[in-house]
Structures are given as C-alpha cells and as structure tokens.
Image (cartoon, coloured by chain):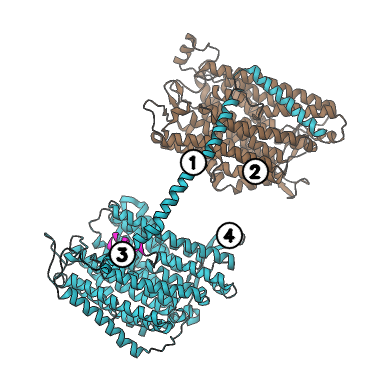
Amino acid sequence: MIAALIGLPLLGAVVLLLGGRRTNAWGHLLAVVMSASSFFIAAMLFMQMVGKPEEEREIGQFLFDWIAVGAFQIPFGFYLDQLAIVFVLLITGVGTLIHIYSIGYMAHDPNRRQFFGYLNLFIASMLLLVLADNYFLLYLGWESVGLASYLLISFYQQKPSAAAAGKKAFIVNRVGDVGLALAILLMFVTFGTLSFEGVAAGAGLAAPTTVTWIGLALLLAACGKSAQFPLQSWLLDAMEGPTPVSALIHAATMVTAGVYLIVRAHAIFDLSETARTAVVIVGAITLLLGAFIGTAKDDIKKGLAGSTMSQIGYMILAAGLGPVGYVFAIFHLLTHGMFKAGLFLGAGSVMHGMHDDVNMRHYGALRTMMKVTYATFALGFLAIIGVPPFAGFWSKDEIIHAAFGQNLFIGLATLLGAGVTAFYMTRMMAMTFFGEARWEQDVKPHESPAVMTIPMIVLALGSAFGGMAMLFIGDIEHWLEPVTGFAYPQNSVSKAVLIPITLAVILGGAGYAWLCYGRRPIPVDAPTNVSLLTKAARADAYGDAINESLFMRPGQYLTRSLTWFDAKAIDGFVGGIAAAVGGLSARSRRLQNGYVRSYALTMFGGATLIALILLLVRL
Amino acid sequence: MNVNISYQALAPIIILLTSGVLSVLIEALVPRTFRRPIQLVLVLSSIVLAFAYLVFNSTIALTSDPAFSGGQIKGLREIAAAGAIAIDGPGMVIQGIILLISFSAALLLAERQIDPQGDAFTARASTLPGSEDERQFTANGWLQTEIWPLFLFCVGGMLLFPVSNDFLIMFVALEVFSLPLYLLASMARRRRLLSQEAALKYFILGSFSSAFFLFGAALIYAATSSVNFSVVSVAMENSSQDGLIISGIAMIAVGLLFKVGAVPFHQWVPDVYQGSPTPLVAFMSAATKVAAFGALLRVFYVAFGSMRWDWRPMMWVIAGLTMIIGSLLAVTQTDMKRMLAFSSVAHTGFLLLGVVASSAAGLSSSLFYLLAYAFTSLGTFAIVGLVRDASGEATHLSQWAGLGKKSPWIASIFALFLLALAGIPLTSGFTGKFAIFTAAVEGGATPLVIIAVLASAVAAFFYARVIVLMFFTEPPTDGPAVVIPSGLTTVAIGISAAFTLLLGIAPQPVLELVINVGLFIR
C-alpha cells in the first residue's frame, strides 16, 4: 500500500516524461488521476490508522536491501506513522487540488504535459521523503524534491531570469544538502545505523558534543530546504516558476521539509540544548526577516514568498522549543499548507486575469471583477493573520504562547511578527482588491474558470475550518504525541492574557496598513523617496548583496588564485612531465627504425639481458 | 602400448583442425563462386561446434584437485594424449576466449561492404602489386578464399598452444598458428607493399624467436631428459645442471615473450599491425595475445613453477620495461594503428603482472584481463577499419578529427573502447586492471604496480587525446567518413562493446568463473 502511494505518481511521471508527445492529449488527466488515487490511498490508510489503538498505528514496509556492503546496510523501506500520515495527506490532498488547478492555469502552455510530469515526479519524491524509514532514503527523497523544484522553477527556461533562479535555488540548496550529508555521515559513524529507530535509540548513549554537531548539521540542511536564514535568498527568486508550483512546492510542501526533518530527528534535538537554541534563533530571525521583506514588495508572489519564509520561521522556531513545540510546528505547517496554497492560487487567479502581471500597483478594485477569487483570498487572509476562528489563529497563537514560555524576547519576536504579518497581508488585500482600478491598458480582468476556482474554494474552506477541525475533532496534540512527545508549556503568561494582546497587535498592524494603503491612493509607479528600511526590504534585506560580498567575491578571488596557481605551478609541473615524456618518447622512437636487422639485434640483446638477470639471481 | 588419448578432451582442437583440412578440400574441389559462402558456413559452424563441445566438457565431470583449496572443481581435468596435452579449467577458459574471439573475427574477415572492391584481402596474392594482372583480378571481383583454411589452421593451433603440456607439442602448435598468420599478414588489398614488408619482417623475426624457443627446449631436455612440463618441473628442482637450465629458461622465455609482444621483443608489433589487413590485426591483437599468454602462464606456472625464485626478477624487469616503453612510445605516434600497437605492448606489460604474481589470484586475474582486453582490442581495430577515405583506411590521427560530429554512434563506441583500454571504471578495462594489480600487490610486486599505475596514467593521455580529437575538434572539410558496414561487422562490434560494458558493470559472474576454474593441472 505504501509503495503504491509513491509508485502511482512515479509511474505518472515516467509515462509523461518518457512517453513524449504521444501523451500530450491526455497527459495532464493521467497526472491528476495518479495524484488523486494517491490521495485516495492515503485517506484509506489514514482511516485504517484511526481505527487502530494508539500503540499499533505505525506500520512499516520493507521492499528490498538497497545497499548491503559489510556493516553498511541500507534497506529500501517505508515507515508510516502519525507524523508521516499527516504529511502524506497534505502532500497528496493539496497536491491533487493544485494538479486540478493547473489544468486551467497551464491550458495554453505548449509544454503542459512536461509540467504535469514534473508535478507527479515532485509528489512521488516528496512522499518518498516523508515515508522513508531511514535517513539515507530520506536523503534520496530530499535530493529528488530538490531536482523537481529545480526543474519547475526554471520551467519557463526561455526566460533568463527563470533559468538563473533555478540555478540559484539548486546551488543554495547544495549548501544545505552538505549539512544533511554531514549529519548522515556523523550518524553512521556514531550509531552504526541510519534507521530512525536506531538513531533515536543510540542518541542517548552518544557523546553530547557529537549529538550537538549532528543537530547543527541537520539545522543547516533544514535552512537550505526551508529557506531559513542565512540560506533564504533562493526562495524569492523561485517565484519565477509557474504559480501552481509556487503554491505547492514553495509554500505548502517542499519548503516545509526542513520542519519535518527537525521534528523527525527530535531524538537528537531533545538531547542538545545548544542545537535547539540555534534552531530557535534561526527561526526567530527568519520570521522577522521574511515578514519585513514582505512589507515592501510590489510583486504579489514575492510578497507571499516573504510571508512563506516568515511562516516557516514560526514553524522552525516552534520545532526548536522541544516537546512543547513539535506538535504546534506541525499543526502550523498543516494550516499554513492550506491557507498559503489558497493564497498563492488566488494570486495565480489574479495574474491569470491580468495578463500575467504580478505588480500589485497595476491591480486595484478587483473584488467586484473576481468575486470568487476575492472571497477565497479573503478567507486565506483572515487565516494567515490569525483572526479567530480561522485556521491560522489556532496554530499561530499556540506557537506564540509556547515561545513566551521559552524566553521573553523570543515571545516578543513572534508577537511582532504577527503584527507585521497583519500589516503586509492587509497591504496586499488593499492594493489588489480595494481602492481604484490602476489596470494597464487593454487589460480586462475576468474571473478564472471553474477548474481553477474549485480548488481555491476547497482550500479556502480548509483555511476557514481546518484549524478547528484538526484541533477539536482531530485532537492533533495527542495524535502526534506518540511520535514527537508533547508537553504543555510552563508559562508565566497565560493564554487568557496573551490572546487579547496578540489580537490587539494584529489589529494594529492591519489598521496601520489600511491607513497607508486602503485610504490613500496608491501611485502606479513605486515611490523612490522611501526610507532606508523600505529600500532594504525591497532589496530582500540585502540577502544577495551579503552573499555576493561574503561568498561570491572571495570565492571568485579564490578561484582566480587557484586558477593562477594551477596554470603556473601545477600546469608547469605537469607540462614539464609531459614534455619530458614526449621527449623520451621521441628519442626512443629512433630505435624503431624499420630495419629487421636492428630489430633482431634488439631481440638478441634482450635474450642476453634475460640470461644475465637469471644468472645474477643465481649468484 | 596402451596410450590414453582422450578424444573428448581434445575435441575442440580436432574439430578446428579437421575443418581446416575440409576447407582445403573445398578450395580444391568447389567452383569459385560457391567457395566463399561454403567456407563461411564451415568456419562459423566449426567454431560454434568447438565452443559447444568446450562448454559441454566444462560441465561434464566433477573431480577433486588437491592443489586447489576450494575442493571440488567442475569440468574436465586431465592430461591427455600420453602426457602431451593438459586439459584443465584455465586452459579451457583460454580456449573459450580464443573461440569467442575467432567467431567475431571471422565475421570481420568476411566483411565485403567496407571496401567497394571486396574484402580486406587482395584479390590474388600471386599478382605483383600495382601490376595489370592485379587490376584485372580486382576488377573481376575475385576473392582470395584461401584465407579460410589458413584461418582455421591458425585457430586450431591457437587452441592447442595454451594446453600443450610438452615443449615439442607447444613448438608445433606455435608454428601451426604462426605460419598462417605470416601469410595472411601479407595479403592486404590496399598498400600491398607495406603489407608484404610487414609480413616478411614478421616471418623473419618470428622464425628467429622460434629458433630460440626450440633451442631452449633442447637445453631443457639436456638438463632434465624430458620435454614434459610435469616431469621437467620435478627434475629441475633436483638437477645440478644450472647452466643448461638457466639458458633453457631464458631461451624459452624469449620465444614466448616475442609472441606476446613484450619489450625488447616488441618491435615487430607496430610494423606488422600497421601493414596487415585491419580485420586480421583485430584477430591477431586479441587471439594471438590470449593464446600466447595462455602458453606463457602455463610454462612459467607449471614447467618452471619450481624455479619461481629464479625467473621472477627477470619477469619484473621485462614487465616494467614493457609497460614503460609501450606507454611512452604510444605518446608520439601519429598513426592510429601504430598507436594502438604500442598500446597493445603496454597491455602486455600489465598482463605480465599476472605472471609475476605467480599465484592463484595472478592466474585468475590474468584470465579475466585476457577476456576483457581481447574483446576491447578486437572492437577497437574493427572500428579503425571503418574510417576510410578514397585511398583506403584513414589511419592518420589528424584524419579522425571531428568524427564525433559526423558519426556520433561509432565515435561513442570507439570512445568506450578507448576508455576501457585506459582502465576507466564501469568498463571491463578497470575491472581487469584492478584485479591484476591487486594480485600483483599480494604477490609482493608493489613497486611494479606503482610503475603500472604511472604507465596507465601516461597511457590515459593518448587514449583521451583521441577522444578529444573526435569530439572537441572541428572536422576537416575533406576528411574521411565512416563506412556503413554490413551486419557482420556490426555484430562483431556489438559483441565487443557488450563485453566491454558488461564486464565493467557486472563483472562478478565472470570473476567467479575465473576463480573457480582452479589452477593449471600438473
């Protein structure tokens, strides 16, 4: 069953990518069917799991020995527990909706079949990542989603910016992948096994420093995949990909893999205070940085990308809090998966109606032209800023509450983040759907077809009720407890005090944004006489500039010096040897003069030589 | 006197030699137009039959060999023909390789589509090069079908050579396979003078080396009163005739090292390879080397096995010289066939490591290396024969520029062979080198292996240079083109490429086979 879960989308990808143009006509439908059947299987497995008593819920499936070299034994096996199943449901559920949406969104693209092939490949890879029963297989999934992400970011490869964005994502992710590779190597050296169970069992016996190093290496991996500080720069550029991709991969699923990794490896983090602190700090910085970037973006997708960074920052922060946070990290991940996917699909729908223009300064007053998009986007908006009773409220408030339990400053950071979130999201709403129309000429906004709006509606319903459903019906805290452990935060600030404060901050942020962007007319061209902070936010908080000056320039300098060294010293040495070989060769060639008599003489000399050596040995 | 002949063990050899006789009769009795197809059927079917018999023999009996620690070994294992011929596992593997190579080589020899005038052999060997007669015969489309009996005798001799257990039989086998080769080498269709010169050189130097061999055998007989390997081995240990024995070993060694093309007995190799018809070179470079190495291994492991400590230093020097000179000289060659000839010399050096090791691992890794190298070499020369311009084969390196753009398939397969010759992983060359180097290190020849690795590095240069030339250089406007061959050559190249790739990717079954065949019977 578990193998079928992955196998179906993989089969779809293989058929679509190898089948070529023959599959053009029905390829997208096959992809949707594959993804949907995968979701169907996931739902069945979930039902089965719910029906079982708590301690029998994990199931494993061993397929074959993948690598077996002496002590290095890696099985190809799957492991489905309460943590994996929620991911599987999210991936296949949201994935299927986005598959359906893409039928409409990509309708006019000549490479639509290829696009669906990549989407299927992504689903299979992501499922492999969350279903692997050991870190090595997880690494395979990890790299495969990286590949799918690369292929999809640079899907419009005729655009240089898209090609560059794909490369950037790939290269930045490489840095994180080195972290995962190091962590895996360290685990193998320390524990002699890479299975989740074996590592969890061995963690307590290993040297604390080693465990900390493993934790930090895992954090580096998470930073790369989840666009956390300091490896965040690729995510904003990744918006060059088609919007459904941004919704699925760069908002709902793949970028949250870092959170999954940390929660999955909680045995490591439980034991290392240092690693946990590092995780919390990275999360706190990113949640503020992302929100800050989001405030100044005029590109609707980049604004949402900044928001994604920020929201994942919340999850990472929560994961760093330990048992009080793991559950809420996953909870927020799930609600975020729904509302952020919905917001992105809404943005895609707007773009669809606006000739693929992404600049919000060219939008305005769209609420009457696109009623469904407006309504669904608004539900997503309410969910993300954390208005009760919508989904984001339940999960984000828990994180803020737990953060205050950890440390006052961390708590304040999450609170401030919530306020900024309300600010940029209100700004986005105001610029897109309210105010006066600032449309470009010959743009006639229109509502998208039903194939696109229905997935948006489904996700909007999730944004509205998903949080309550998971908390009250699903009892997510105790659902995940057997896997991650759970503890109520020991807190000086009670929820009763915190919730009104949080709501006040959110209201303040939203109100201020409304004053700035809802009440005043918005200039079509972005004003240039802006504060330094705005400039910084527009420039992605100088992430690229920092990378360039810290890594690229010294790297280039190092490359140049190495090239110089290579050309002068090494090539000189090698060239010298080559010249010597060539010279020797040319000289010894003269022995090969073509005369039989001299050949025979050489043979005679050889015979003498052999006899002489044999005699010498005897002496 | 009741002599144990054991026809069953000798069947493959008998089949080939009988077919050779039949083939002569066909030449004498069958009308000219039917000769080629009949000969071809006879040649291919006799090789297939011999191979089938060999496989049958290798599965038939279970005998236990105290010399082999693994206990029971499958396959025929007996000294046949009154002690003159030894049929055993390694011998049968060598025979099997020779038969496989001969089958593919026969396909190459039969090819008629590459050259618009006919096959690779002259229309009439008796005509003077450049004469009016020659032109006439060529225009009438005559073929020299006498190549087939020669080929069959040659293969028969090669099958006998590595299983001879007696210096005299070995000498006879040597001549049975050498004489046809001298003749065949002289019969190229194009550049006949070069071909005849090459054949004459080959013949004179070959006779010279045969004389060494025969004289060595006489000296050994003088010292031990026997030419039988098993008897010689025992007698040598107890003999006091040091002078005779050492001279005998030295002279036998010269005769055998000449055939494998070891330095300083290698100088015929480039000249003969360059002048001979290319399909024949493909056959010679593969099959002769396999047969000669089979004999060399048997003589030094069995007959001179008890004198190991005397001859090993000599082999060290020869192996080292062969690797160094072979790789070094290949670097400055400008002719493809000459370059490959020197590369073949270098590979002889690598193979000699297996003799130096003189252990079970040395033997099994040599067998693997022989199989791997034989097919790669066959395929390489088969492709060399395909690249032609108006005057025949285009063997100058500069003419190969840009071939990858014009004929990507052939160039890619050629690149595969070159990578295998260079010993790059995932090709048979890597597995072979790795196995034989390991065996040599275990045998205490680490310094020699270091030389081997360095020589491989030098060798990688000239292989890579051809790849660069083919794929990263613009083709000349009037350059040669790849001729589309008939199915015969395609099959031969396909078999070679398959072996080269398979033995690189999944070498395990063959490695197990060559280990499980055990040692030479004494």
Report helix, strand or loop for mark 3: helix
Query: Along the line of sight, which residue is nearer the eye, B239 or B34?
Result: B239
Give the CA separation, mark 1 to mark 2: 34 Å
Q: Tell me the shade of chain A.
A: cyan
Q: Which residue position is annotated with label 4?
A: A68
Residue A186 location, quadrant: bottom right
Within 10 Å of disc 2 (Cα), the crowding (few <14, some 14-19, many 20+) is many
What chain is tagged by disc 1?
A: A
Q: Is residue B506 above or below residue B213?
A: below
Q: Which residue position is annotated with label 1?
A: A568
What chain is tagged by disc 2?
A: B
For the C terminus of chain B, the quadrant is: top right
Q: Give a yes or no on whether discs 4 and 3 share a subunit.
A: yes
Give the CA separation, mark 4 to mark 3: 46 Å
Q: Which residue position is annotated with label 3?
A: A540
Give the foreground label among 4 and 3: 3
Query: Along the line of sight, which residue is nearer the eye, A543 or B375?
Result: A543
Disc 1 marks a residue whose amino acid type is: Lys
The image shows residue A506 at horizontal and vertical percentages of 27, 81
The image shows residue A161 at horizontal and vertical percentages of 29, 55
Q: Is residue A396 above or below residue A596?
A: below
The image shows residue B206 at horizontal and vertical percentages of 66, 22
| Mark 1 in CB contact with mark 3 (< 8 angstroms) | no
Within 10 Å of disc 1 (Cα), the crowding (few <14, some 14-19, many 20+) is few
Give the CA separation, mark 2 to mark 4: 25 Å
